[in-house]
Image (spheres, helix red, strand yellow):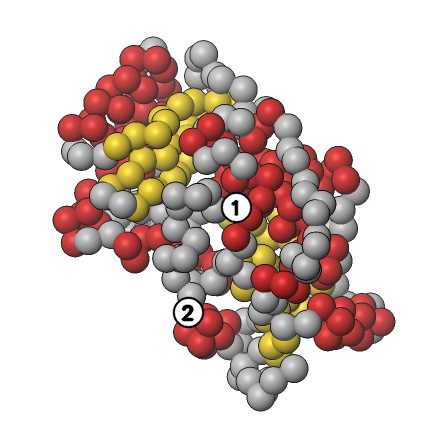
Amino acid sequence: MNAHASAAWPLTTKEIPNLRGVVAEWRAQGDRIGFVPTMGALHEGHLTLVREAKRQCDHVVVSIFVNPTQFGPNEDYSRYPRTVEADLQLLAGHADLVWLPEVEDIYPPYSATRVTVGAAADVLCGAHRPGHFDGVATVVTILLNAVRPDMAFFGEKDYQQLFIIRRMAADLGLPGEIMGVPTVREADGLALSSRNRYLGPEERAKAPLLHMVMREIASKSADGEQLHAALEEGRATLRNAGFVIDYLEARDERTLAPLPEPSLHGRLFVAARLGSTRLIDNLALWDVRV
């Protein structure tokens, strides 16, 4: 533990034995433990997860760990923002314990075991980031086994990730209920993300178009327009605005299978780049609320 522990600042630790000791003390009192895993560079979206965890549990553990195994060889692991002091300031008064492991704490020397997930990891982001979700599944398994929470909270902005973690936790009997929390957005609709800070002023002005296009597609589908045609129009709108699209698709949110026509279980998924920044978002087809 370090000197940040006080009435205002959360306890912090790097070592798994210390983490488990604190959690064991709470659990011995009969308290429920909530867990929010993050990669840091925290924003209001993360705090929403922490607040929800606090609402449903007695104590909240937040981990901050930039996981190298979920980044591809040409991705932004080294560039990913590390803002631990600012993150701790944001968590003051919200989290009870912040776990700050080093890479060797999560992946000790000579560690060789990795979690491989199924077909759901090969579509959408998985098709464009091979191995990404195996890295996510591996680190989440390690984190959940270290904390052993009653509930773990993930944002719906990364819906495919949430889907895969739920499936993995059920398949492997991992501790804790996996809870999804709705996406938090800026006033103009842009989903909050740590990567938004990479956007230049012109790119930031264009970025909300992702959400606007999805809402238009959902609205047109609800009005009876063919889903395929609405998707094609949406892709054209984004390309004309300067986005480089990885995908804009409709899928069944229960299975991630392609969705040929509108459905109460349909969800739109998009990933696109503005300059060097990759943005993702999703929206339920029935969600066309103002």
Q: Is residue 177 above or below residue 287?
A: below
Q: Quadrant of residue 41?
A: bottom left
Q: From this viewpoint, is residue 87 visible? A: yes
Which circle's residue, 2 or 1, is located before the other in the chain? 1
Number of marks drawn:
2
Q: Nearer the viewer, residue 110 or 257?
A: 110
Q: Secondary structure at mark 1?
A: helix
SS category of the residue bearing label 2:
loop
Residue under the image location 19 percent in, 53 percent down: 200
Image position of 45 with respect to 271: above or below: below
Q: Amino acid at mark 2?
A: Thr
Residue 186: x %, y % from top left:
31, 52
Near mark 1 (Cα within 10 A), the count class, few <14, some 14-19 or many ≥20, is many
Hey, which residue is sitting farthest right in the picture?
28
Callout 2: few (<14), some (14-19), or many (20+) C-alpha neighbours within 10 Å? few
Please name the residue shown 35% across and 18% down the image: 221
**Residue kind at label 1, given as amino acid type:** Gln
Q: Nearer the viewer, residue 82 or 112?
A: 112
From the viewer's perspective, is residue 248 above or below residue 201?
A: above
| Circles 2 and 1: CB atoms closer than 8 Å | no
Q: Is residue 121 left or right of residue 147?
A: left
Mark linked to residue 83: 2
- Quarter of the image with the N terminus in it: bottom right
Q: Which residue is at a point 54% across and 71% down the rendered structure image?
A: 94
* Residue of label 1: 70
- Say which mark, if any, is on residue 242: none
> Is the C terminus in the top left, top right, bottom left or bottom right quadrant?
top left
Q: In the figure, is residue 75 to the left or right of 92?
A: left
Q: On the image, which quarter does residue 17 sit in? A: bottom right
- Cα–Cα span, label 2 and label 1: 19 Å
